[in-house]
Amino acid sequence: MPDTPYLIAAVAVSAAVTWALRALPFAALAPLRASGTVRYLSTRMPAGIMVILLVYCLRDLPLTEPRALAPSAALAVTVGLHLWRRNAVLSIVGGTAVHVALASTLFAH
């Protein structure tokens, strides 16, 4: 078993590295907050990320098969709820509920 000073030093080094790794993003981002590019990206990226996620999730969906109905209906419900209420949580939960309900009942294998 290692002696006590070694264990204390190991815990201290681990704590210092953990603290530094958690503080580093905040220290690095502080000067970027005044940047026009960062402000532009902060307004445009959420929609861009959602489009990339949508394409990634639906890229292999065979549109000619009946099993494509569950994801398509879930997508329509998600978009409809979001346009209606502008509430991300409601949209995500509603779309997920429709997909799970359809996939587990109508299209269960």
Image (cartoon, rainbow, N blue to C red):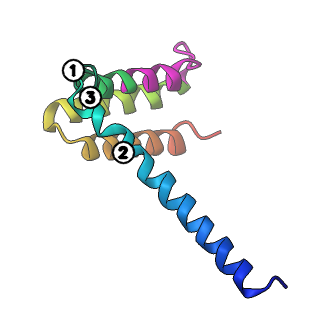
Residue extending furthest toward the top: 64
Spot occupied by residue 63 in the image (x, y as percentages of width and height): 52, 14
Write down the residue under mark 2.
Answer: 27
Position above or below: 62 against 71:
above
Query: Residue at image x 22%, y 26%?
Result: 39
CA gap, disc 1 to disc 3?
A: 10 Å
Amino acid bearing label 1: Gly
SS state under label 2: helix
Separation of residues labelled 1 and 2 (CA atoms): 18 Å
Q: Residues within 10 Å of mark 2 (few under 14, many from 20)?
A: few
Residue under label 1: 36
Residue under the point 27% across and 19% down: 37
Indicate the secondary structure of the residue bearing disc 3. helix
Q: CA distance from mark 2 to mark 3?
A: 18 Å
Task: Give the quarter of the image for residue 72.
Answer: top left
Three-letter code, disc 3: Ser
* Front position in the image: 43 or 61: 43
- Secondary structure, mark 1, is helix
Which one is in front in this view, the residue at disc 1 or the one at disc 2? Answer: 2
The residues colored magenta run 50-66
Given residues 92 and 20, the one toward you in this image is 20
- Quadrant in which residue 79 is drawn: top left
Say what amino acid the circle numbered 2 marks. Ala
Location of mark 3 (residue): 42
Q: Earlier in the sequence, mark 1 or mark 3?
A: 1
* Label located before the other in sequence (1 or 2): 2
